[in-house]
Amino acid sequence: MTLLVAFTLFVLAVFLGLELITKVPATLHTPLMSGSNAVSGITLIGAMVSAGTDHSALTTWLGFVAVVLATVNVVGGFLVTGRMLAMFSARSTKRRPSVGEEPS
Amino acid sequence: MSRLDLVAAAYLVAAVLFVLGLKSLGRPRTAPRGNLLGASGMLVAVLATLLDRSIVDFRILLAGLVVGSAIGMVLAVKVRMTAMPQLVALFNGFGGGASVLVATASLVEVGDQGLVDDQFAVAAALTALIGAVTLTGSMVAFTKLQEIGSLRSFPGLAVLRATMVIVAVVASVMVVTRPGDQGWMWALVAAGALLGVFGTIAIGGADMPVVIALLNSCSGVAASTAGFVLDNSLLIIAGSLVGASGLVLTQIMCRSMNRSLFDVVFGSLAASGVAPDASDVYGDRVTSTSAEEVAMLLEVAERVAIVPGYGLAVAQAQHAVRDLMRTLNDSGVEVVFGIHPVAGRMPGHMNVLLAEAEIDYERLLDMDQINPTFAQTDVTIVIGANDVVNPSARTDPDSPIAGMPILDVDESRTVVVVKRSLSPGFAGIPNPLFAADGTLMLFGDGKDAVLDVVAALLNG
C-alpha cells in the first residue's frame, strides 16, 4: 500500500466517522463510546502479528503484553456495551405486551 | 484466491461490519445489533489475522488472547454502572498502551532488519507518542474517577508540560533520523507517558465527560497511525472511524459546558468570570421544607419533572427515584426526567444509571426536549445537580458559567432541590435558584430524602 492510498483510506474514514455519529441521542452516548472504544482495540490484530512473528524475545514479549491489553479492551468493551444495551432494551420489550393489550 | 487476498477480503468485511455497527449503535432500537455487528467484525479480523504467514508461533499469541479475554470478561461483568466511566477510561488506556507496544515492537523488528523508511519511522513515532499519552492520560483519569489518591495541579506544571513537549519533539525527530537506535524510541515513549500525566493531572471532575471523550478519540487515532506502521488497511479505517466519532462526542460535551477544548485541557476555568458572594445571593431568602410538605405538593401535581445530577449517583439514589416515579405514576401523575448532557461523569452516563434502575428511556428527555415544557410543569425535583440548573448562566453575563446551556427548572411552578447543604457545585459559585421564590430546599442525603417523600406519599 502506498502512502497516498493509506492516506486516502484515512481521510475517507475520518469523514465517514464524523457522519456516522452526528444526531445520536444522549441516551446512547455511553454505549456508543464504550462500543467504539472496543472497535479501537483493533490494534489487537497488529499485536497478534508482533507476538507470533518470533523475531526476538523482546518483540515477542512486547507483542504478548500488547495482545493482552488489546484483548481486554476488545472483549471487555463489547461485553460491557452489550450489558448496558440489554438494560435499555429489556425495558422496551417488557412493555410491548401491555401496549398490545390496551384495546381490550 | 491467495492467502493474502483472503486476509485482505476478510479485513474489508470487518471494516464494513464496523461501519454498520457504529451506525446501528446510534439508534436505540438497533443499538444491540450494532454492538453485535462490531463484535463480529472484530472476530472476523482476528480469525483472518491467524492466517497471516508471518505468524510462526501461535502459543504466546493464544496465551495473550486467553488471558486478555478472561480479564476483560471479569471486568465487564463485575463493574457497577456508576463506575462505567472508570472502566471506559481503563479500556481506553489499554488500547493506547497496546498501540504503543505494537509500534515499538515493529520499530525494533524492522530496525534490526535495517528496512526502516521515513513513512514507517514517522508513523511509528506518532503511534508511540499518541499511544503513550492515551495510556497514562487514561490512567490519571481512572484514578480521578475512582477517587484514588489526589492528583492535582501543582506550581510549575505548565513549565513541565512545555519541557515534555520539547523532549517529545526532539525524540520523535531522532527516532525518524536514527531508527536503528532504540534508546530514542524508549525516550519518546517516556516523554509521551509523562505528557499524558501532566496533560490530565489538572483536569477537574466536572470536565471528565470531555476528557473521556477526547481520550477515546486519541485511542482511535493511535490505532490508525499503527495502521500506517503495519501497512494495515483495517487498522487505518477502524482507528480513524473511532478517532472521528470520539471527536464529535468531545465537541458535543464541550458545547454542553460552554467551554473550549483548550480551556478544559489547560485547566483555565473561566478565569474572566466574577462569582458573587454566597451570603449576598442567599441572604435569608432560602426556604427549607420537609418530606411531608413535598409529598403534599406532589399529590396535587399533574406533571412532575425530575432533574438528576451526579450527586444522585453518589448517593446511590437511582432506585429510590424509581420508587418515587412509580408511586406518582400509580396516582396518575406524569413523571419525566430532564437530563443535562454533562450529567454524570461521561457522556450519557446518567441515562445508563437510570436505565439500570429500570426507568424507561422514553421518559428521559434531553435538555432541548424538556426545556420548553418546564413552564407547564407543576413540580420539578432537582437531585444532586447544581451548576446545570444555575440561572446565572442565563442572567448574569459576568458569571463564570455565563452562556452555559442549562435546564430552565426555574420556569416550573415549584422547584424542590434535594441537597445536603448550600455548598457550591464544581464551578464554585452560589446558585440563585436556591433562594428563588418558587424554590423549596429539602436538605439531606439524596436517597434518604427521596425515600422519606415516597413514605410520606404512601402514608398520606
Image (tube, coloured by chain):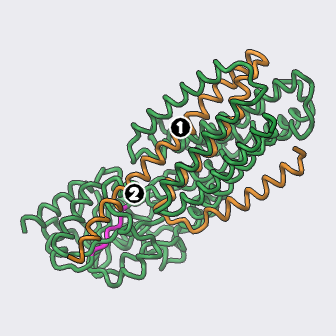
Chain colours: A orange, B green
Place of residue B261 in the rendered image (x, y in percent of width and height, measured from the top left) = 64, 59
Task: Give the residue type at disc 2.
Answer: Phe
B201 vs B424: above or below? above
Residue B58, magenta (yes or no): no
Q: Residue at x 63, y 51 (%)?
A: B17
Query: Image quadrant for the N terminus of chain B?
Result: top right
| Range of residues picked out in magenta | B304-308
Could you tell me if residue B285 is visible in this image? no
**For numbered disc 2, what is the local secondary structure?**
helix
Place residue B125 in its image quadrant: top right
B208 vs B343: above or below? above
Place of residue A18 in the rendered image (x, y in percent of width and height, measured from the top left) = 67, 62
Q: Residue at x 52, y 31 (%)?
A: B69
Place of residue B217 in the rendered image (x, y in percent of width and height, measured from the top left) = 65, 51
Residue tagged by mark 1?
A: A75
Residue tagged by mark 2?
A: A88
B242 vs B198: above or below? below
Residue B307, magenta (yes or no): yes
